[in-house]
Image: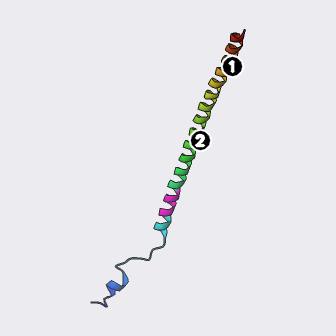
Amino acid sequence: MSGSSEEASGSRGKKPDGSAYKAHMEALEGRNAKARKDGKAKRAQREQDQAVAQRATERRQDADLRGSKVRGKSQMK
């Protein structure tokens, strides 16, 4: 029994050629690239939104300062 030719030759099939590993790694690299691309897009959008909000805040503050200077001069007369 221990020396039968069936057990020795073929129950395990052919040797692995690395194609499954290669396919797995390519899929992993694809997911990583997509995640990186999505992350960059989200970051760019967040930074753009923050810049718009910052400019709006600065405009409001500038308008408040201009308004207080005008009021300040008229009150001094």
Dot 1 falls on a residue whose secondary structure is helix
Amino acid at the residue labelled 1? Arg
Image quadrant for the C terminus? top right
Give yes or no for residue 26 being in the magenta stretch: yes
Dot 2 falls on a residue whose secondary structure is helix
Q: What residue is shown with label 2?
A: 44
Which residue reaches farthest left?
1
Is residue 33 shown above or below 15?
above
- Left or right, 49 with reference to 28: right
Is residue 27 shown above or below 18?
above
Which residue reaches farthest top?
77
User: Which badge, 2 or 1, is on the more N-terminal residue?
Assistant: 2
> Nearer the viewer's eye, disc 2 or disc 1?
1
Is residue 53 shown above or below 65?
below
The image shows residue 23 at horizontal and vertical percentages of 48, 63
Q: Nearer the viewer, residue 77 or 39?
A: 77
Q: Nearer the viewer, residue 63 or 50?
A: 63
The residue drawn where x is 62% and y is 34% is 51
The numbered dot on residue 66 is 1
Q: Nearer the viewer, residue 18 or 4?
A: 18
Helix, strand or loop: magenta stretch: helix
Is residue 25 shown above or below 58?
below
Instruction: Check disc 1: other Cα within 10 Å, few if <14, some if 14-19, many if 20+.
Output: few
The image shows residue 13 at horizontal and vertical percentages of 38, 76
Disc 2, disc 1: CB below 8 Å? no
Amino acid at the residue labelled 2? Ala
- Left or right, 15 with reference to 7: right
The image shows residue 26 at horizontal and vertical percentages of 51, 60
Q: Nearer the viewer, residue 66 or 27?
A: 66
Instruction: Check disc 2: other Cα within 10 Å, few if <14, some if 14-19, many if 20+.
Output: few
The residue drawn where x is 50% and y is 54% is 31
**What is the magenta range?**
23-29
